[in-house]
Image (spheres, grey):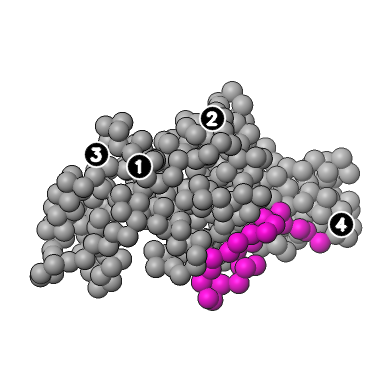
Amino acid sequence: MTTKHTAKIDINKKLKAVGYNPKFIESLLPDWWDDSITETPAGLQEAGLLIGRLFSIKPETLWAHDAKPVLLKPEGAQFKQRTNTQIHDLDIACALALSAARLVLRSFRYEYSSGPMLDSAELRNLLLVQGKRWVSFDDLLDHCLQVGIPVILLQNFPAKARKMEGVAFEYAGRPCIVLTQKKSHGYLLFDLAHELGHITLGHTQGGQWVIDDKIDAEDDDEREQAANRFAMELITGNPDLRIVPRGKHLYPNQLARAAKDYGEAHGVDPLHIVLNYAYNNKTHWPTAEAAIKLIAASKESDQAIVKEKLFEALDGDILTEDDSRALRHLMG
């Protein structure tokens, strides 16, 4: 067996051993990648550093043939998970969240101040005093980026890997938020406000990761309740707002119109009103989904907005083509 074959098989097996499938591995590596890099000890070490950074694996466990690969996972992580999810099921998703954050922060334009953050009421007032009708997803995303908190969309995962709905954590001395929601309008506003709540309330201090397998407005966990109340007050001005139907069942056009009217009168995003209504009236989800399509017709998806604004926040003179390619793949 040649040295080239031994090194190549070793790295591929190690990546597979921690949960990365061949198609995902190939998609994340730079275009210039060639397995011949691993033919020499120096090349193997270089490959270990590159792959370790992209896939969040300790590089020394890649270039040492007799070592088991070790994912870089958050220490002291606080998982809020579904009852049928084991913590290790989210290891790959957490590792990729870390990879994405490292890629972003290499060229992120905005400085972060570690001083006190605005509470939910203060932040809502700040955004509304700027002439906004309500706290929209775009406005909250802009605020997070401008105060130095990167908000990253993570959409591509290896085959069979489980994902969380949101993560708030600190890396390199600053908080980061990673979101994974795929539904195109409305949902990301509460998810972002919830994760910002974890950061503002100090849940990520000391290197803690708060990993929300599911963001649930009815969660009974103390920290999740606090983050939910932060999000609700920020978005609506009332941490306990529950929108329930009165009278007959609404049709989608009626719900969309009522949400717009209520939103204008109370300074609340109509998309959140529709989702709030649906969460509190589970049988009305089909109506709510149809109403969202009416309200958001012709609007750019929230996912597209995250991608666009995040790349605008990156310094093009620092962001390399390889990092940009890897980040775009992770974000979908």
Q: Residue 65: give its label.
A: 4
**Closer to the camera: disc 4 or disc 1?**
1
Residue type pointed to by label 3:
Arg
| Magenta-drawn segment | 68-92
In x, y percent, where is residue 58? 77, 51
Give the residue type at disc 1: Arg
Mark 1 touching mark 2, by CB under 8 A? no
In the structure shown, which secondary structural element does the residue marked by tag 2 occupy?
loop
Q: Which residue is mark 3?
A: 133
Is tag 3's residue or tag 1's residue first in the polypeptide sequence? 1
Q: Residue at x 39, y 52 (%)?
A: 231
Residue at the spot of label 2: 110
* Upstream in sequence: badge 4 or badge 1: 4
Image position, residue 254 (x, y; %): 12, 58
| Contact between labelled residues 1 and 3, with CB atoms less than 8 Å apart | no
- Amino acid of disc 4: His
Residue 46 position (above or below residue 167): above
Looking at marks 2 and 4 on the same chain, the residue that comes earlier in the sequence is marked by: 4
* Residue 87 is a magenta residue: yes
Which of the two marks, 2 or 4, is nearer to us in this view? 2
| Residue in the image at 71% along x and 54% along y | 72
Q: Which circle's residue, 1 or 2, is located before the other in the chain? A: 2
Q: Amino acid at mark 2?
A: Tyr
Q: Residues within 10 Å of mark 2 (few under 14, many from 20)?
A: some
Badge 1: how crowded within 10 Å, few (<14), some, or many (20+)?
Answer: some
What SS does tag 1 mark?
helix
In the drawing, what numbered circle is on residue 69?
none
Is any part of residue 201 visible from this angle?
yes
Which mark is in front, 3 or 1?
1
